[in-house]
Image (tube, grey):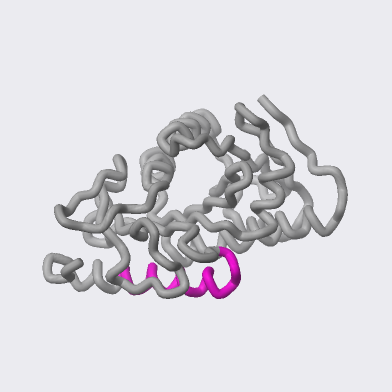
Amino acid sequence: MSYAPFTAAARQTAQQLAGISRTLYERGWMPGTSGNISVRLPDDPSRALITASGRDKGELTARDVVEVDARSGRSSRPGQARPSAETSIHAAVYRVTGARAVIHSHSPYATVVAHRVAARDAVASLRVERFELLKGLGLKDPAAMELPVFPNWPQVQRIAEDVAAHLTAGGEGPPGLLLADHGITAWGDSLGQAKNRLECLESLCQLLVLSRSELPVSRA
């Protein structure tokens, strides 16, 4: 894609996005072409940059991102590469939460937890409490959280609709969610904050797995 129409701020943002992608790849959280990252443009938050579909996250550069409408997920520039297949989920988070960055990864412990606790056709809820890392999520009450776990429907738009409905009804929930057999999505006011929250959520899932205790789950 050509950078000519992009502002200097957008080019810098694309480079930051690509750098985080490579970091998460090196951790084993975005193997191959899996995972996706988006961020609202600093000079126009109605638009966002997101990783293009099918790109190797370990080799991602600023040229491997595309521009979309932040609220709809539709491509906003002709002739671009195809946006990530999960762009509609990012757009759902942006519409409801006002976040400025969203990261989805296939980090191993979150994926294992999502595999264990997910319901087949309804949103499940995983209660996490007492761990000090909860304080890293910006929760109103950092003593505990109910982490939603969504079915991984083959139709991504259906997942996005579930996410939007849950976030709209859920009030002050955690800045993240799990997808059955699929991984974790986290968001924040910046790429840095979204990455930090992703790390906290993955570490909390790791602690739950290592504790070998029964996972406290409720299902709708």
Looking at this rendering, what residue extends furthest in the top direction? 220
Residue drawn 48% across the image and 58% down it: 35
Residue 30: x %, y % from top left: 53, 64
The residue sitting at the left extreme is: 4
Q: Report the residue at 62% width, 42% height from top.
A: 180
The reply to whether the magenta stretch includes residue 32 is: no
Identified at 86% across, 53% down, the residue is: 212
- Our reading of the magenta stretch's main secondary structure is helix
Q: The magenta stretch spans which residues? A: 13-29
Q: Is residue 198 above or below residue 182?
A: below
Does 25 appear in magenta? yes
Quarter containing the C terminus: top right
21 left or right of 173 in image: left
Point out the image quarter for the N terminus. bottom left
Question: Residue 173, located in which quarter of the rendered image?
Answer: top right
User: Residue 215: which quarter of the image?
Assistant: top right
- Image spot of residue 211 (x, y percent): 85, 56
Residue 7 image point, x, y percent: 17, 68
How many marks the image carries: the answer is 0
Residue at 58 percent across and 35 percent down: it is 151
**Is 145 situated left or right of 160 in this image?**
right
Residue 181 or 42: which is nearer the viewer? 181
Q: Is residue 188 above or below residue 4?
A: above
Horizontal relation, residue 188 to residue 108: left or right: left
